[in-house]
Amino acid sequence: QVQLAESGGGSVQAGGSLRLSCAVSRYTSTATYNTLCMGWFRQVPGKEREGVAGLYVRGDNTFYADSVKGRFSISQDNAKNTLYLQMNSLKPEDTAMYYCAADLRPGSSCRTLATMTRMDYWGKGTLVTVSS
């Protein structure tokens, strides 16, 4: 079982920055953590959830939605079992509930957002509001 808890959401003006964090339960073993495909998703009421960014914990590859490339950066800290999403140059259209998700799988299956359509573990979300 992998438990995820997001934090860091809030309200910011357009052009501002926020950093989201996703803490993986301290009861998750190192072996399990190292085999996680993890990512950030977002959803606006009435719209489908969309993938924002992803990575494989043991890999070097990160991948992003076109809408956030160059503005958002995903990273993780092995020592803290935590996933991050640094969001810069925020736009009103970035307003959404942001969710952290994880799935146990080999790195070869975690290379694009298209491969992250099925994720077994989800956090409860953190709200990001960007005003113009």
Image (cartoon, grey):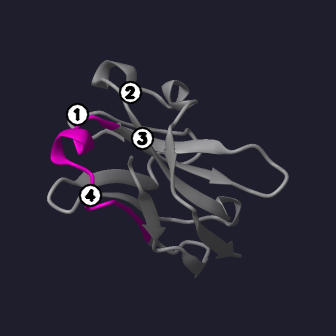
Marker disc for residue 54: 3
Distance of label 2 from label 1 (alpha carbons): 9 Å
Give the spatial CA distance, label 3 vs label 1.
Answer: 11 Å
Residue 87 image position (x, y, % from top left): 46, 62
At 58% across and 80% down in the image, what residue appears?
Answer: 12
Crowding near pointer 2: few (<14 within 10 Å), some, many (20+)? many
Q: Residue 110 carries which label?
A: 2
| Quarter of the rendering containing residue 52 | top right
Q: Residue at x 56, y 31 (%)?
A: 118
Q: What residue type is labelled 1?
A: Gly
State which tag comes first along the sequence, 3 or 1: 3
Q: Residue 56, can we see it?
A: yes
* Stretch in magenta: 19-36
Residue labelled with disc 1: 59
Q: Do the residues labelled 1 and 4 touch (CB within 8 Å)?
A: no
Q: Nearer the viewer, mark 4 or mark 3?
A: 4
Residues at circles 2 and 1 in contact by the CB criterion of under 8 Å: yes
Residue, disc 4: 27
In terms of sequence position, does the residue under pointer 2 or pointer 4 come before the other? 4
Secondary element type, mark 1: loop
